[in-house]
Amino acid sequence: MQEWTDNAKEILQNYLEKARKSLEMSEVDANEVIDDLRRHIDEEVIAANLQIITKEDIEKIIANLKITEPEKENCKEALNVQPEDSKEVKKKKD
């Protein structure tokens, strides 16, 4: 059975709350996206065979989430995703 530290739970909760706030301003179903994110994180925990999930574990999993370009535009602030190349982003906006 897996056990989450209090810090890991807090990191995940804060991440999901920020994501929800950002997603609610977009045209996507925030609940569906949050459920998908949570499911993906749970799958990563299982794949890593973690029995005790620490703050560092969840931060690493969150940092490794792959987010597509439309999702980046909708939730980059909430998910702390920074454009890799600001020139590329500027071109897309033009």
Image (cartoon, helix red, strand yellow):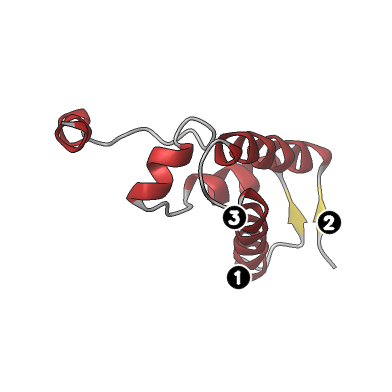
Residue 11 position (above or below residue 36):
above
- Secondary structure beneath dot 1 equals helix
Quadrant, the C terminus: top left
Quadrant, the N terminus: bottom right
Give the image location of residue 18, x and y in percent: 63, 34
Q: Residues within 10 Å of mark 1 (few under 14, many from 20)?
A: few
Q: Nearer the viewer, residue 25 or 33?
A: 25
Q: Quick check: 3 left or right of 68?
A: right
Q: Residues within 10 Å of mark 3 (few under 14, many from 20)?
A: some
Residue tagged by mark 2? Answer: 3
Residue tagged by mark 1? Answer: 47
The tag earlier along the polypeptide, 3 or 2, is 2
Give the image location of residue 8, x and y in percent: 73, 42
Q: Nearer the viewer, residue 9 or 35?
A: 35
Q: Quick check: 43 left or right of 53?
A: left
Q: Quick check: 57 left or right of 82?
A: right
The alpha-carbon separation of the residues under discs 3 and 1 comes to 21 Å
The tag earlier along the polypeptide, 1 or 2, is 2
- Secondary structure beneath dot 2 equals strand
The tag earlier along the polypeptide, 3 or 1, is 3
Residue 53 position (above or below residue 9):
below
Q: Nearer the viewer, residue 45 or 90?
A: 90
User: At label 1, which amino acid type do we have?
Assistant: Ala
Q: Quick check: 25 left or right of 52?
A: left
Question: In the image, what residue occupies the spot 81% across and 62% down?
Answer: 2
- Secondary structure beneath dot 3 equals helix
Q: Residues within 10 Å of mark 2 (few under 14, many from 20)?
A: few
Instruction: Give the quadrant of residue 45.
Output: bottom right
The alpha-carbon separation of the residues under discs 3 and 2 comes to 24 Å
